[in-house]
Image (tube, helix red, strand yellow):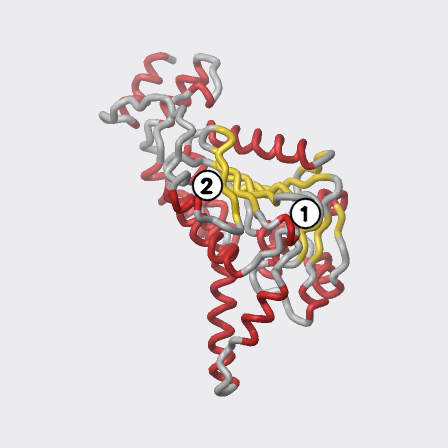
Amino acid sequence: MAAALARLRRALRPSWPRVSRLGSMTSPMTSAAVQELQSLRLLQERPRVLHLQLHRPGKRNALDLRCWRELVQVFRDIAQDPECRAVVVSGAGAAFTAGIDLAELGSLLAALPAQDAARRAWALRRHILEFQESFSAMERCPKPVIAAVHGPCIGAGVDLISACDIRFCSQDAYFQVKEVDMGLAADVGTLQRLPKIVGSQSLVNELAFTARVMRAPEALSCGLVSRVLPDKAALLEVALEVAEAIAARSPVAVQGTKVNLLYSRDRPVSEGLQHVATWNMAMLQTEDIPKSVQAALDKKGPEDVPFAKL
């Protein structure tokens, strides 16, 4: 076994230097730019884990125009942050989110150009695409994102959590695809992502056509969430523990897994297999594999392995 491990090391790790354990709680994300966030709050409560809060508790975390912009920038920055390996998203106060801020949406619609229908439509399409990018940037971020939902998760909140990789909720959580009650079709991700998450087009159609409330037990049974916790405190503790467990694994392995899961979700199995083969012809050369094998032989866990930043 020792000889085989030595051969594996020689094959997969030509000459990279050893990297010391990551122990710092300092991250490039804790910069002046982070301090300027107004509708969001970014915290680092565990090593290599960021906690992003929707932070308009007085408005039940309704998503204002500033929040949509900040989400894009934050997740683009997190994607490039080598210190971060997982993200938890939660809501401050008594709600996860009440959805889009309707007052600001009204102001946006009132400000559309008045020349003619084509120009108004063109401007409105641009705004819709900008809103979509807020959650697509979260989905594309290679670091796994865990949604921790308590209380109401309404309208755009369902769009948001549909773009997350893992979803937990508390017993008091409820979910509502609210858009039809406001006279519009959901347009920032729910209709595209939710059917792939719950696996029942009939259920998604019912929720989207009627805007009925789905409570935590049903969300668990249909697969929208994978755990229901007793309260917000327990929810956040479990979400952060899972994020910490993810962060303890090889970032090459975890981020490669997310990239390939997303690629394969929307394509035939054959294309997904081709993609992961091409991906791993490079990634299997990582020094993380012999480190992980050695840790397993030594009966140690991933948290004992000094994986380099990515």
Residue at left 57%, top 29%? 241
Q: Which residue is mark 1?
A: 95
Q: Quadrant of the N terminus?
A: top left
Residue at left 67%, top 51%? 153
Percent from the top left, x then y, of residue 266? 51, 55
Q: Is residue 7 left or right of residue 174?
A: left
Q: Quadrant of the C terminus?
A: top left
Q: Quadrant of residue 149?
A: top right
Q: Nearer the viewer, residue 277 or 136?
A: 136
Nearer to us of marks 1 and 2 is: 1
Element class at badge 2 = loop
Q: Nearer the viewer, residue 65 or 127?
A: 65
Amino acid bearing label 2:
Lys
Residue at left 58%, top 60%? 192
Amino acid bearing label 1:
Ala
Percent from the top left, x then y, of residue 201? 68, 58
Q: Nearer the viewer, residue 204 or 97?
A: 97
Q: Which residue is mark 2?
A: 143
Q: Quadrant of residue 207?
A: bottom right
Q: Which mark is residue 18?
A: none
Q: Is residue 218 left or right of residue 13?
A: right
Percent from the top left, x then y, of residue 169? 68, 41
Callout 1: 10 Å neighbours few (<14), some, many (20+)?
many
Element class at badge 1 = loop
Q: Is residue 53 above or below residue 1?
A: below
Q: Nearer the viewer, residue 201 or 30?
A: 30
